[in-house]
Structure formats: C-alpha cells, structure tokens
Image (cartoon, grey):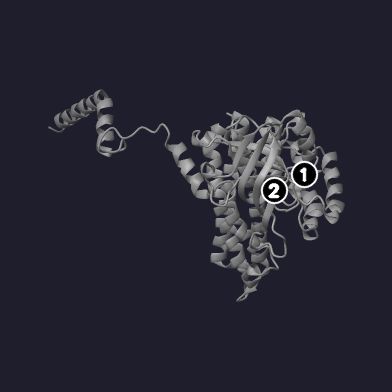
Amino acid sequence: MAWDFETEPDFQAKLDWMDAFVRDEVEPVDHVIEHAWNVDDPVRNRLIRPLQEKVREQGLWACHLEPRLGGPGYGQVKLALMNEILGRTHSGPVVFGCQAPDSGNAEILAHYGTPELKRRFLEPLIANEIVSCYSMTEPAGGSDPTGFATRAVRDGDEWVINGEKWFSSHARFASFLIVLAVTDPDAPPHQRMSMFVVPRDTPGLETVRDVAIAGHEGQQGTHAYLRYTDVRVPADRMLGERGAGFAVAQTRLGGGRIHHAMRTIGLVRRTFDMMRERAVSRHTKGESLGNKQLVQQMIADSWVEMEQFRLLVLRTAWRIDRYQDYRAVRADIAAVKTAMPKVLHDVVARAIQLHGSLGISTELPLGTWLLESFHMGLADGPTEIHKLSLARELLKGVEPAPDLFPSAHLPRVTASARERFAEELAEVAGELADIAVGAGERAS
C-alpha cells in the first residue's frame, strides 16, 4: 500500500524556490516583452537570459530531458508540480527551458535524429539559442491527420515537399520546422506520412500570413499559415522510418498534452486566487461579495473542480512514470485533455462575473484566459476526438449482457443469490420452523 500526497522535503524546497522566483522575477517580465519565444528580441534576451542562468544554477533547467540530453530526468509527477507554477506565466516555460513546441521537438530529434541533426538543431534547441516549429495541421485537414494533403516526393538524394500548413505555431521565430508530409499515399492511413526537418530559410518555404489569436491585442500573430512550394531537403532530414510519421508524432503528443494540463492548473489557480481576492474586497448592499450565497457557491464549485482536475492530472503523471509507455495511459491522457478546457472555462467565467465590467475589459487578463480555454479545447486535438478515444478505451473488453436484461437485473441477481445460498437459507428456515413449533408447544 503506497498512497502518498506529500512531496519530499528536498524537492519541496526546489518548488518553494520556483514559486518565489516566478512570482518575483518572471511574472514582471511578461508585462514588458512582446514574446518570450523571440530569441532575436534584444529586450527579451536582456531580461530572460539572466533568469535562465539562475535556473541553471539551481539545477532546474530543462527538467523534462533525460540526463544524456543535459536534463535531470525528472519524472512526470515532479514535472506536474513544477508546471503548476510555470503555468501562471507566459515566460516561465522559456525561463526554465521546457517550452512547447521545443520540448516535444527535442524529444523527436533525440529519438530519431542523425548525429548531424542533433549537432545542428538539437543542441542549440536545448540551450534555447534557437527555437523551433511543429508544422503538422493543414487548412483542410483539421484534426484528422489521415486527411493531410501535403506531399513529399523522393527525387534522387532529396525529398521535394509541396503543400500548405495551418497554425504552425512560432514559425516566424523558428530556425527550423518539423514537418509532417505524405510520402506513401497508397499505404494504410497511418502509414502514409513521414516527418522531416526543414530549416526556416529553405527556398520555397513561404509564410502566407501570420495568424493571431483573439484576445491577444496588439501582438503580431505567431501561428503561421505556410506554403511549401518545391521545398527540397536532403534524404537524411527524415526523422524515423519512411511512413512512420504518425508513430513518430506520438513521441511528442502524449507528453505535450499532459504538460499543457499541468500548466493549466497553474492558470486556473491564479484565476481562483483573483476570485477570492475580489470576493473579500468588493462590497455591495452593506457586505462583501464573499458573504453572498451565490458567490460562495461559485467559489466552492471552482475549488472542487480545480482540485478534482489536479488530482486527475497527478494520477495520470504517476501512471506515466509507472508504466513508461504513453500507450498504457492513453485513456488517462484523453480524460485529462477532455476535462482541461472545461475547468479553465468555467472558473474563468465565474471570475469574470465576479469582477463585473472590469472582468471583461482589457485591464484584466480574464477575457484572454477565457478565449484560451477554447484554444485548449482545440490544441493537440479537439475535445470531442479525445472523448471518443476515451470512450473506446473504456469500452474495450467489456462483456455484453448475457441476454435481454442487464447483468444487474434484480430478479436475475436475486435468483442467483438464492441459488448460491440455498443450503444456508434452508437451514435457517428449518431452525425458524423448530423455534415456532417449540413456542407453540410452550403456549399450549
């Protein structure tokens, strides 16, 4: 029996340092830089580089990486506790060297990259000297990769890529992109695609436009609409085997989904703290909002939902550490992904309501976070797809009812129980009959 809800004192000390560091040093940076991923921004570098050095001194840099890649090899439970803290800030993941999509792209390069690809792209990526882009989604493909149309055709010692990609995040900052393209159109659906490393300055790679997310006022879009026109890359830029692109993608997607959820906990908790502060600060009709019963209900519901989600995420992280196989926790990850946008949406919506007109203004971040909940419901696959995946996993191996009626049908269950205990019931009936006869004789 090994249930434990405590953190080791040594690691708790690291979390305490992180909490204070993020609050005092990192969160203020969010308000004076445009984008933490832009490694060409001198203001960003002036402020973030020194913070990254402090993180390295604490041994907390790129904690998702194995020791052979320069990280401490922390498991998912420790990463969950760390990401709760990082999730309340824009710059935090970059300061700690665990930002998406670079973290997932690093995993792919570590598993499938050639020594040359690792030297040229992986090493500077881990050091945050450069950033990367994951170019997968297509304008017509949506969440179904089996419908992707971008093609890569072999031509001698090169692959020639043609097609369009949509919402390729951070492409305008990236030194290279990891691209998913169809190489074997006649193969089974999940064996048609392969994955390639494409340097950003490769001829034929065009940004049609940069797309912004609603709620991020004043920022240039960072989710690119890209066009690949006869983009040529050497054959050794393929990651993994030909036709194995879908399998290679799973290297990053399982971890990416759980890390998103970990950081969402931090954002929800920050929202919840704003709710509590508002409830005790704002007064109406002679008393604080916190004394109003409907407000109390909003706060109670938010806390319960937040803590339930947190426990689900931590349990999933524990199972990943336990089994070391994302496939074994597919249902858990789908459940986390399904719950994540709703928890964020509901808690933020309540916080907006408590803050009134200030809540919907641009003077608080709540409106942006509300839209972020819809982003969370789409990124790494829409919620509906994960619900289907979860349901399929939960229905595997379930036996159907033995006949017309459910196995829990009370007449069936009662008859079965009476049959099982027939001897005991007969004995008790006989004993009761003897007692009744004896009582009758004494009465006469």
Answer whether residue 198 is visible to the viewer in this image.
yes
Residue at image point 57% right, 65% down: 295
Q: Earlier in the sequence, mark 1 or mark 2?
A: 1
The quarter of the image holding the C terminus is top left
Please tell me whether mark 2 sits on a helix, a strand or a loop.
strand
For residue 26, side relative to residue 349 (left or right): right
Task: Check disc 1 and report the residue beneath it.
Answer: 96
**Secondary structure beneath disc 1?**
loop
Residue 3 location (% of width, % of height): 60, 33
Asked whether the residues under the numbered discs 1 and 2 touch, taking CB atoms below 8 Å apart as contact, a structural biologist would say: no
Which residue is depicted at the point 76% across and 43% down? 97
Give the number of the disc on residue 205.
Answer: 2
Residue type at numbered disc 1: Phe
Label 1: how many Cα within 10 Å (few below 14, some 14–19, many 20+): many
Q: Quadrant of the N terminus?
A: top right
Give residue 223's position: percent from left, percent from top: 66, 54
Residue at 72 percent of width and 48 percent of height: 86
Q: Which of 70 and 207 is in front in this view?
A: 207
Quadrant of the rendered image containing residue 272: bottom right
